[in-house]
Image: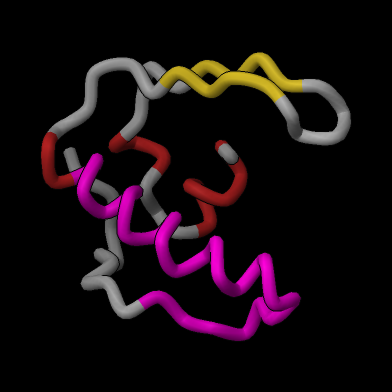
Amino acid sequence: MVDQLALLGLDSDFPGLVADVNVLGDGLVQLGTVRPEAAELLAELVMVGLPAELTGTTDMAPSTGLRDTPAA
């Protein structure tokens, strides 16, 4: 998850991110303290990505206003 957030330029929005997952990706991810806007964006990304994952299509671009630079 950290790698995916970094690819989207959102890694600095989740500085307290800690994952306890197995090799299959099953487990728990703790986000830590995040801004409401960052939590809303993450929820939107999950809602876009889940149907794409379930249907096997990964070419769907999220309709979010992703920033070009991470938040300070």
Magenta run includes residue 3: no
Q: Quadrant of residue 54?
A: bottom right
Side of 61 relative to 71 (left or right): right
User: How many numbered marks have been drawn onto this rendered protein structure?
Assistant: 0
Q: Is residue 23 above or below residue 56?
A: above
In terms of depth relative to the viewer, which is nearer, 43 or 65? 43
Q: Quadrant of residue 67?
A: bottom left
Q: Quadrant of residue 48?
A: bottom left
Q: Residue furthest right?
A: 23
> Which color scheme does this rendered protein use?
secondary structure
Identified at 26% across, 54% down, the residue is 41
Which quarter of the image is occupied by the C terminus? top left
Q: Is residue 49 above or below residue 34?
A: below
Q: Position of residue 35 (x, y in %)?
A: 14, 33
Q: Position of residue 60 (x, y in %)?
A: 54, 83
Identified at 29% across, 37% down, the residue is 13
Identified at 62% across, 85% down, the residue is 59
Side of 34 relative to 19 (left or right): left
* Magenta range: 38-62
Q: Is residue 45 above or below residue 17?
A: below
Q: Residue furthest left?
A: 36
Main SS class of the magenta portion in the image: helix
